[in-house]
Amino acid sequence: MSKSDPRKLRDVDMPPAHDAATRLVHGGRPAAAEGGRPVNSPLIRASTVLFDSVEAQRDARRRRGRERLFTYGSRGTPTTFALEDMICDLEGGFRTRLLPTGLAASTMALAAYLRPSDHVLITDCVYEPVRHFAETHLKAIGVQVDYCAADGGDVAGKLRPNTRLIYLECPGSLVYEMCDLPKIAALARSRGILVAADNTWGSGLLYRPLVLGAHISIIAATKYLGGHSDVMLGTVTTTEKQWQALQDCCDAFGMAVSPDDAWLVMRGMRSLSTRLARHEASALMVARWLGERPEVASVFCPALPTSPGHEIWKRDFSGANGLLSFALRKDFGVDAAERFANALKLFGIGSSWGGFESLVSLPNLRAARTVSDWSQWGPIVRLHIGLEEPQDLLDDLGAAFAALATPGSQTRAA
Ligand SMILES: *Cc1c(COP(=O)(O)O)cnc(C)c1O
């Protein structure tokens, strides 16, 4: 392709030596049009795509299963292609597929590689709706589903002759357990087993599962890539060898994303490294502060030296984000945790994370895990630390701890 070809993305020309933060700014740029070029990739919406001749259309249709061609809206437009290339570059993969949600990215990654009577091993700390998909759809089509410890310590003993895929999430959802991906990948590869990793926490910038030995990496771009709590999108990036199965499955199901949503995610990604650095600094400040509170039994945050798995985080990750959880002392009940969340003024009560704002939620770890036992712990509070001034957040948390000690204190609506 020539340099003026609109399908050719600028970042393909860029030396890979640039830091990811630089590539996030310069990647996915449009090629020159007559006269000049805009900074941002144009938003191209399409269902019908026109061809110069019947032969050209026939040729494109013949090639589109294997090559990325602009042939029909559901097969992607130059806007979605630009985002795919930015994410693929971050992940260090062969190609990237965009899906309507992070969950759709996870379920497509499972559906693409698993067949009836295959065995799949899933880490205990997996994002709960993925477990639901495994328990309902995968089991219904005859896939054998099994769970292993969040840190992957029991993987070797749980493999079967028909194990096809290990699906892990590192760090895990809700309390951020770490697992040794390079070790699991080496074991899996020696047995011809595929490894898929949910990389939403690391967002491609902090963690690169494909570079560490996984075959498939999944990101809920809804979180930090979008970064503004206003768009849903998921991505699956694979190695060259695993690409075709994913592509075929997504095409067969008619999976496509709106170019408007892809454009929003690309806009969010321009500031990803700056936002993550601020989320990380503020979350660490809050995590250290929480560690000193008498009400808190434990803080879950892999970037804290006292956290289990910190050594793996130091080895495999280039940074942290705004997520952390903590356990209240066992003498506090769920009602106390609810009082605490209700008393917070700057932390929104809502699902998801990765936007610019702080959030609080109260996950039920006893229900969310089947391999590990959380019945000995007090209530768990999950925080997403946003881009607010951290001292304001500490003041808000301090006031909520005061409310924790006072049954009957005001709820947010009062
Ligand atoms: C949120 C999340 C998903 C799902 O993303 P959606 O876009 O909300 O469907 C998947 N994995 C992890 C780890 C998540 O936190």
Image (cartoon, rainbow, N blue to C red):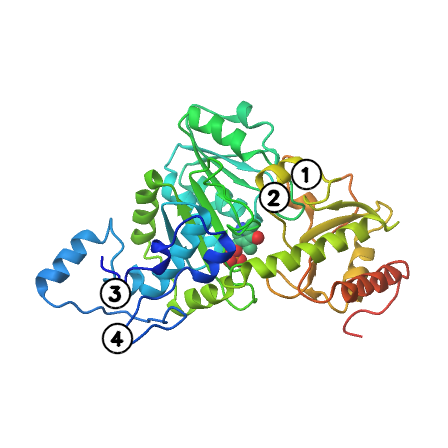
Looking at marks 4 and 3 on the same chain, the residue that comes earlier in the sequence is marked by 3
**Pointer 4 local density, CA inside 10 Å: few below 14, some 14–19, many at least 20:** few
Amino acid type, callout 2: Gly
Amino acid type, callout 1: His
State the residue position of label 1: 310
For the residues marked 3 and 1, what is the alpha-carbon distance in whole angstroms? Answer: 47 Å
Amino acid type, callout 4: Glu
Dot 1 lies on which element? helix
**Pointer 3 local density, CA inside 10 Å: few below 14, some 14–19, many at least 20:** few
Amino acid type, callout 3: Ser
What residue is shown at x 87% (from left), y 67% (from top)? 409
State the residue position of label 4: 34
Q: Residue furthest right?
A: 406
State the residue position of label 2: 172
For residue 47, the mark is none
Q: Nearer the viewer, mark 1 or mark 4?
A: 4
Looking at marks 1 and 2 on the same chain, the residue that comes earlier in the sequence is marked by 2
State the residue position of label 3: 4
On screen, 356 above or below 302?
below
For the residues marked 3 and 2, what is the alpha-carbon distance in whole angstroms? Answer: 44 Å
**Which quadrant would the N terminus be assigned to in this image?**
bottom left
